[in-house]
Amino acid sequence: MSEIRISPRIEGLTIKNYRALRDVTLADIQPLSVFIGANGSGKSTFFDVFAFLAECFQVGLRKAWDKRGRFRELRSRGSHEPIEIELVYREYKGAPKITYHLTIDERDNRPFVAEEWLQWRRKKKHGLPFKFLNFQNGQGSVISGEQPEESDTRTEERLESPELIAVNTLGQLARNPRVAALRRFISGWYLSYLSADSARTIAEAGAQERLSQTGDNLPNVIQYLKEQHPAVLRAILEKLAARVPRLERVDADVMPDGRLLLQIKDAPFQEPILARFASDGTLKLLAYLIVLNDPQPPPLVGIEEPENYLHHRLLPILAEECRIATETMQLMVTTHSPFFADALRPKEIWVLERGQDGYTQAMNAAKMDGITEHIEAGAKLGELWSANYFSSGDPLYQGEAL
């Protein structure tokens, strides 16, 4: 039977000199990865690493760098070394592991790509890994072709500027399919900063395939699903109705002035209400369900603190929805909620804590003493978290670092 190909999956991540992430490595990353920890432990910084890398590909290194306050705010305090990000991923299950390394430094108050490479080992058990893309300061080489081999011809390339990312530039060429696959992967990441207030916006009419980061085009996406994927929209609204008492339907109707009006109807009443009068929780849950049931899902989705505005009984259900969604996408989630964690498995949780040196440390819950045994005995991760088994889940805990 042929292998079912899905979106690439990240299996390992190393970050150096990125704010509180002075030197952190995550291994054996799961399709659903959830980051927990006290305020200031580095959860949002992990989230922002993915956002920064995606923006480097979508709008360019300089804009992503400027947006975050340049190296003055980006680089770890006390460090004078460059930022390094390294991803280990597979293009599909059973494919060779590929490592992507990116080093960003500063010169004359401008960022530049000091080093960038792609490395893999073609044979699973034999042969050494080799770099089929290797660049420094805007110059380097690439081995083209569907399955680059170390013995294949290397093409020397020079980019127009050292600010350009080689994968983003050379990935636009058909002769570099492995490079192009990584470019599509990172460019397609979706990082959610959903806001109930943004979802209340009365948008200009016009179907749109995907929610914006803030959700301000929610009516447009509902219009798109209504026109192109009615069965998907019906399934989403059935799930929403099962979790929001008395909710009957959600409509996106075009007004005479050409704008879209999002309306929500409760079963006991004849007339629907405008979305701007709906509860924050209803709008947030609707937006999350749309993201998780996207007919053309992004390869990686980041969701920050999904518990906000939602009833705690809905959070284990939402966590299970996230796991189901990983059949077609990878999810990175930050949370403060033990109720969300109750539905998770130890390998899916990363516990973050600031060490004595002020920098973030990360430990997988499956590697922590006693956690797996407690789960096997019937405990839930959220319960263990609340009982301070993770130590760093309690902002008042003053014990030793992980």
Image: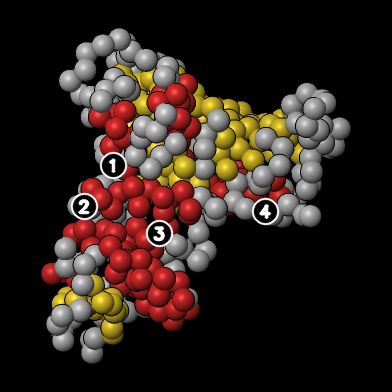
Residue sitting at 36 percent across and 32 percent down? 379
Query: Which is more toward the observer, 54 or 159?
Result: 54
Circle 1 residues within 10 Å: few <14, some 14–19, many ≥20: many
Q: Residue at x 50, y 47 (%)?
A: 330
* Cα separation between marks 1 and 4: 33 Å
**Cα gap from disc 2 to disc 4, whole angstroms:** 36 Å
Judge the density around disc 3: few (<14), some (14-19), many (≥20) Cα neighbours within 10 Å: many
First of labels 3, 1 by sequence position? 3
Q: What element carries label 3?
A: helix
State the residue at coordinates (41%, 50%). Answer: 320
Could you tell which of marks 3 and 4 lies nearer the N-terminus?
Answer: 4
Task: Say above or below: 252 vs 21.
Answer: below
Which numbered mark, 2 or 4, is in the foreground of this view?
A: 2
Q: How is the image coloured?
A: secondary structure
Q: How crowded is mark 2: few (under 14 residues within 10 Å), some or many (20 or more)?
A: few
Total marks in image: 4
* x, y percent for residue 234: 40, 75
| Type of amino acid under label 2 | His
Residue 374 location (% of width, % of height):
40, 26
Q: Residue 311 carries which label?
A: 2
Query: Pointer 4: what residue?
Result: 5
Instruction: Please give the residue where the numbered disc 3 appears in the rendered image.
Output: 291
Quarter of the image where one finds residue 135? top right
Q: Can residue 48 be seen in this view?
A: no
Reply above or below: 101 against 280.
above
